Image (cartoon, grey):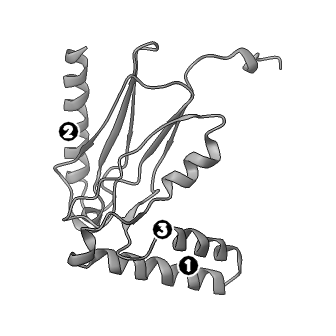
Amino acid sequence: DHEQWTEFDGLIVCGFQELWAWKTGLIPPIVLWCVSWCEYVPYLGLIVTFLFQFLSLLFGLLPILKCLPIAYNPKKQMIAKLKTSLPFAYYDDNIPLRHVLDNGLLLMFNHKPDECGMRGYHNHKCEDSMAYKGFLFCYFKQFHCLVINTHLQASGDGKARVAQVHELLAFVQEFKTSL
C-alpha cells in the first residue's frame, strides 16, 4: 500500500448517468429486476428484457396508472453494489407528469454531503424532453466542494444545450453567494 489508501480520508465522488427510472404501472419493480437476469442469455434474453421494459414503460404512461407510486429504479441496484466503498448516495427519482423518465443521475460518496438537491432544466427539446433533464448537486462543507452531475441536451442544434449550461452557471453563482 505505497499510496496509503487505507488511511485516505479525502473525498471520493462517483457520478453516473443514464440510470433511468420510470413508472411501471401495475408491474412491480421486482419483476423487472428478475427479468434483467435474462440479459445474460444470448438473443432470447435481450428480447425478453426489452419486451418487459417496453410493456412496463407503456403501462407507466397510461394516465390512470402514471399516478401510482410503482416505478423501476436501477439506481438502487447500483447503490447496493457499491455501498461498502461509497456508503452515501444521492439521487432524485421524481418524474413530473409531463415526462416519461427521471433524470437518470446518481451521485455516490465516501463522506456524507451537507446539502443536496436537484434542479430541472427549463430548456429542453426533441426526444430529450421525455426525460426530466437537469442536474444533481451536493455540497461538502468540510472539503469546500460543490459536486454537480448533469446530462445535457443530446439532440438538436445545440441552442438548448447552451441554455442549459447558462442555467447551470446561474445556479453556481447563486450557490456561491449563499455560502
State how far apart marks 2 and 1 are (Cα): 37 Å
**Residue 110 sits in quarter:** top right
The reply to whether dot 3 and dot 1 touch (C-beta < 8 Å) is no
Q: Where residue 107 sits in the image (x, y, percent)? A: 47, 39
State how far apart marks 3 and 2 are (Cα): 34 Å
Residue with the mark numbered 2 = 167
For the C terminus, the image quarter is: top left
- Above or below: residue 81 compared with residue 124: above
Q: Earlier in the sequence, mark 2 or mark 1?
A: 1
Q: Amino acid at mark 3?
A: Pro
Q: Where residue 2 sits in the image (x, y, percent)? A: 82, 17
For marks 2 and 1, give the one nearer the viewer.
Answer: 1
Task: Report the front residue among 129 and 66.
Answer: 66
Task: Report the front residue among 177 and 75.
Answer: 75
Residue at image position (35%, 39%) is 136
Q: Earlier in the sequence, mark 3 or mark 2?
A: 3
Q: Amino acid at mark 2?
A: Glu
For the N terminus, the image quarter is: top right
- Say whether residue 178 is left or right of residue 88: left
Residue at image position (32%, 42%) is 135
Tag of residue 49: 1
Q: Residues within 10 Å of mark 1 (few under 14, many from 20)?
A: some
Q: Earlier in the sequence, mark 3 or mark 1?
A: 3
Task: Report the front residue among 36 and 154.
Answer: 36
For marks 3 and 2, give the one nearer the viewer.
Answer: 3
Q: Amino acid at mark 1?
A: Thr
